[in-house]
Image (cartoon, coloured by chain):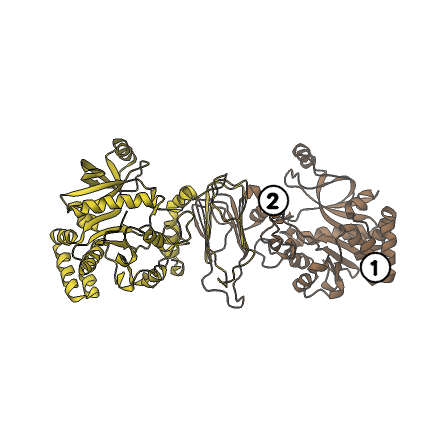
Chain colours: A brown, B yellow
Amino acid sequence: MSSSPNVYAVILAGGSGTRFWPASRRLRPKQLLALAPGVAESLLEATVARLEGLIPAERIFVATGTHLAADTRRALPGIAESQILAEPVAKNTAPCIAWATEAVLARDPSAVVVVLPSDQHASDPAQFRRTLALAIAEAERGRITVVGIVPTRPETGYGYVKAGEQRSAGVLAVDSFVEKPNLELARSYVESGKYYWNAGMFIFRAGDMRAAISRALPELGRGAAELARSGDVEAFFASAQSISIDHGVIEKLPELSVVPGEFGWSDLGSWESVWELARKDERGNVAPPSAVLIDADRNLIVDLRTHPNPKEPPAAPPVVALVGTQDLCIVHTDDGLLVLPRARSQDVREVTEALRARGRTDLL
Amino acid sequence: MSSSPNVYAVILAGGSGTRFWPASRRLRPKQLLALAPGVAESLLEATVARLEGLIPAERIFVATGTHLAADTRRALPGIAESQILAEPVAKNTAPCIAWATEAVLARDPSAVVVVLPSDQHASDPAQFRRTLALAIAEAERGRITVVGIVPTRPETGYGYVKAGEQRSAGVLAVDSFVEKPNLELARSYVESGKYYWNAGMFIFRAGDMRAAISRALPELGRGAAELARSGDVEAFFASAQSISIDHGVIEKLPELSVVPGEFGWSDLGSWESVWELARKDERGNVAPPSAVLIDADRNLIVDLRTHPNPKEPPAAPPVVALVGTQDLCIVHTDDGLLVLPRARSQDVREVTEALRARGRTDLL
């Protein structure tokens, strides 16, 4: 696969999840953590690396918040500072993509843009790139295109894209978007073979998106046009409506395409999914080599403690020992320790809520 | 209760348990840890404090190992250095008590000695002292006396003392000593009302113990006599037989007394017993106030992490958070973290064995 000179990426890296406490914090959100199996780099770095051969660094824009801009730049030294779009205030994805669209159009009026989340995993990057190439080709025909993940289970936590007729090899019309279903509906979606997970990946010609925004959200369109003239990012975000690109624009379009993708996708939504993806020992444990595991099954140990001198790691690392535990997550940082059954991974946010209620914002 | 001027204590503080890893280490054994509920001092300090009003510091000897002598002195600044008996090599309790007996006799030929373990708990210290006072009075009549703990459950982990006829108010003859029973036997012992736990507390006139050692272990008796003349502790321990005072001397005596005691005794034998004794919240958790507990029941959290500057503890302490866990022990030190179900507390030694097998003696 060769790189087309007019294809750009816009990576959305403004998230501030609380689902990975104590590893994740407001200033160290999920995309800056190395949560993917066997990968020492952050999810954001892995997202950029996954585009290698398809979109080079000089055509990758990264949208983030001003509070994360410095760490984002540090994580991505190959991306020019002018390509880091630091939002002064979070206004959901529509204003962000409107800005990115104008930034890309200023570089290339014929640009095709691939919008990607920064905090997902793909175990088959080559297949991921082949899927994107199909979607890019479809976008070049003038249809805004979404990647639809072929579902592997009746997941109730995601929105689905319902596909209609086939348009070309590997490309289908979008019939409709559906919200998170209940379990029964989710089962019928998976069985039908017509529904895909909406993973938040959109591909479009920048000019098409500019026009779509102007039609669906005319005020935002005018603001973006003014931004393109003035360069006044502060003023644009101060007045911009807070709305998602999905609800505000994409779902209102009459002509959308979907390219189904099967590339070992995971949204890494919780410690549970970190465990699911990771390489396990013969008893299903995911643990550092220093751990002592006695009668322990299917546990996840994440040890992120630092030591005073990072240049001289201790010859004898601290030890985590488990005796007779099953299906626990244990996450260890310098200032926090979390212990919970893997099945309760979704409830990490109750901890962050409790810390907020106690005024422990230093830990958030 | 007034203090008799010829009553001495000998506290046995040479232990090196592994049951409290990662809190306990070879150089920080159980008696130097603050494991008792609501008590900031170590078990050893609490043992000394429990004698207040009965035996003053100037008549308390502490037997320990040379490797623990400095920390033992630091823990007990009120005890003169000459009263810290530092054994150059561990030879079980008989040589240790032979030495202590000679040391006390050199101070007072009429001395009565109370031998006490250093790592136990008594929730009712006044009752503990009343029990000792009875035993001291019996020892002064010339009979070596043991304290027998009135059993509260059919414990299979302790040896028992079987009592015979009553000798005086609160004093019974010892019929025999019995080894750790099986559960059925233990139940019958408790039901009979004639059996008491042997907690390793012995009370005797020093001269009686010197004579008893010379009869039961003549070689040790000759060694002790030589030690009394020469003061050569190294030579005494180099040649001394390694044997317990129980098996070597006490159990062979024809005339023993037992004073039953009920003073909220616990041997604090494991993390489980630390949890049992400690004050709990309404859901049975034992945890520092900073902990976040969500849907958590009957857990024990012990956080012994230090911070770089002990004089300026952090305003915001590290947080341990539990979500949906039941009956877990979580013990946290700078270099170790242990997680296990409370019911598996006895298996902590498997961790220390695994660490030894890996050469991680730095953690032992």
Q: Nearest the camera: B350 or B204? A: B204
Tell me the number on the disc at residue A350: 2
Judging from the image, what secondary structure is the residue with disc 2 in?
A: helix
- Where residue A339 appears, as percent x and y from the top left, is 52, 47
Residue type, label 2: Glu
Give residue A105's mark: 1
In the picture, measured across the screen, residue A238 lies left or right of residue A127, that is: right
Q: Nearer the viewer, mark 2 or mark 1?
A: 2
Question: Residue A138 in the image: x percent, y percent?
Answer: 79, 50
Chain at numbered mark 1: A
* Residue most extreme to the bottom: A311
- The subunit carrying tag 2 is A
Determine the residue positioned at 38% across, 44% down: B273
Q: Quadrant of the C terminus of chain B?
A: bottom left
Describe the element under mark 1 as helix, strand or loop: helix
Q: Position of residue A266 (x, y in %)?
A: 64, 48
Question: Based on the displayed image, in which of its 4 quarters is residue A67 positioned?
Answer: bottom right
Asked if residue B359 can be seen in this view, the reply is: no
* In front of the other: A74 or B233: B233
Q: Residues within 10 Å of mark 2 (few under 14, many from 20)?
A: some
